[in-house]
Amino acid sequence: NALGDGNANDDHFPPRIDPDASRNQVWDVSFYTVKVYDTQGFDGATGTDDMRFLDGRYGDVDMIPLSGNVYLEVVDPDQNENPLMSELIHGQWNKDAFTGDDGDREYTAAIGSSTFDPDQDANEDSAPIWWMGGPNASGSDDGNSDIITPQGGVTNPSPLYLGATAGGTTSTDDSISGLLETVKIFMWNAQRGTWERMDLKETAPNSGIFRSTTCVLVADARHPGDGNLGSQPEDTIMAFYQDPSNHSDVSIISIKVAAGGAAGVTPPERLVKVEFDKDTYVAGETVTIIVTDDAFAGASEITGTEVLVLELDGTVLETWNTIPAAPGAPQNDFQVTYELPADVSGTLTVTYTQPFPGGKTVSDTAEVIPAELENVTGIDVTPNPFDTEVTFTIIAKPTVAVADKLTVSVYDLLGRKVAEVSGTNTASVSWDGDDLRNGAYIYVAVVEGADKVWTFRGFVYIKR
């Protein structure tokens, strides 16, 4: 009755519009929520609308200007039947049916029937959800094929029930591009009667998100209704979706044109973010990266070429093409892990890009610091003997810790210093002994860190 329905019990769905509505605005129609008995178009548990209008930049909108164009997006995991393919939902998925095939409704006879029988089953309810009658076996026509728009409600051209007359067509029920009205997914201007079929393509394999392959122009003052909805300010554009796998899953949304009229409904914010599980890591630790994306809620994974990139001070450490769902976490969380090298420090940056056209890019940062040195128990010399170069590495606790300073002095057997190498904030230094002859040499390693000093001595051998 809030829509001006004169009789709530007349079996009309959607209800007929009462031209004598108290607001004296015959076509001032908008929906906030339509209850459906499935969770594909509307998630009753979370209150999330999973069907929405998008503008030309694929952004959620609750109002569209006359100069704009509109896409339709539906989240329907039912139709994600092959996780390896981006699947298509044809707006006329009942295309094997003919216009007069209208299920059990009063004015339609069965397919192939040669006599008029208003009560006979037509075997397949191919008509759109608003469509009431049509040509039957006896050749008669109810003439009222539009439950939403009452006969005479749209008068230009006249008589006009559902569709506008596109260029060259002879049917006033055709779409703005001349399509027949037996479609299942479409946009419709409730004031003008103009409409267009919407075919939906999955945005990425296994995403469960379906977006219309084309947009609909809101208006064109030069050719109203021909290739556009012919809208005017304060018109209501509605979108209808019927699930081809579950025919009872029907969703309806609406949007206002330009300013004025009923207020638009602000679409819910679709959360997209990526974050580290900590702000600071110690070199050698395992990093956990969490991606939260409402667009993939309920999916087993997010897939796309280099959909996630991890960098350290601008250098790529790792990339991922698949992000699995996080076990035991909310259904919109996805997670990967990465083990940091033991000798790194600096700023980590992780970047996530939604793997579909117009997808958002988000990022997060964290710091990597060397582990705090607790104790040093020795020096590892590798290789020993060596040919030209040898590396001296502290045996530290914890194992990933580094020294504030490491100095290694090398002496020959007569006690003469032949080399010295050092480094800061490091766990190792290397010495090139290429200019020395074969034989044994003595090294003295001094390790500084944690306000302590450790000294170690040993032999190193050159052998060529």
Image (tube, rainbow, N blue to C red):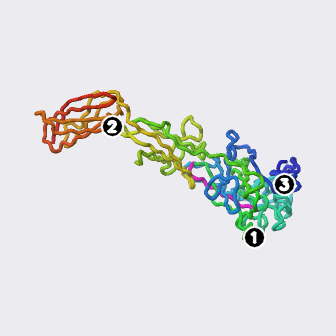
Q: Which of 3 and 344 is in front in this view?
A: 344
Q: Quadrant of the C terminus?
A: top left
Q: Residue at x 67, y 40 (%)?
A: 46
Tell me the CA gap for discs 3 and 1.
28 Å
Q: Is residue 437 left or right of residue 87?
A: left
Q: Quadrant of residue 370?
A: top left
Q: Name the residue under label 2.
A: 425
Question: Number of numbered discs present?
Answer: 3
**Which residue is at the front of the view, 447 or 55?**
447
Was residue 198 drawn as part of the magenta stretch in this picture? Answer: yes
Q: How far apart are marks 1 and 2 (CA)?
A: 79 Å
The residue beneath circle 1 is 169
Residues in magenta, as a range: 194-206
Q: Which residue lies furthest to the front in this view?
A: 451
- Which quadrant would residue 389 be assigned to in this image? top left
For residue 56, above or below residue 77: below
Residue 108 visible, this angle? no
**Which amino acid type is marked by label 3?**
Ile
Q: Can residue 242 be seen in this view?
A: yes
Give x and y (percent) for residue 258.
72, 58
Q: Residue 17 carries which label?
A: 3
Of marks 1 and 2, the one in the foreground: 2
Whole-percent x and y of residue 3? 82, 50
Answer left or right for 34 relative to 11: left
Which amino acid type is shown beneath numbered disc 2?
Asn
**Upstream in sequence: badge 1 or badge 2:** 1
| Marked residue nearer the N-terminal end (3 or 1) | 3
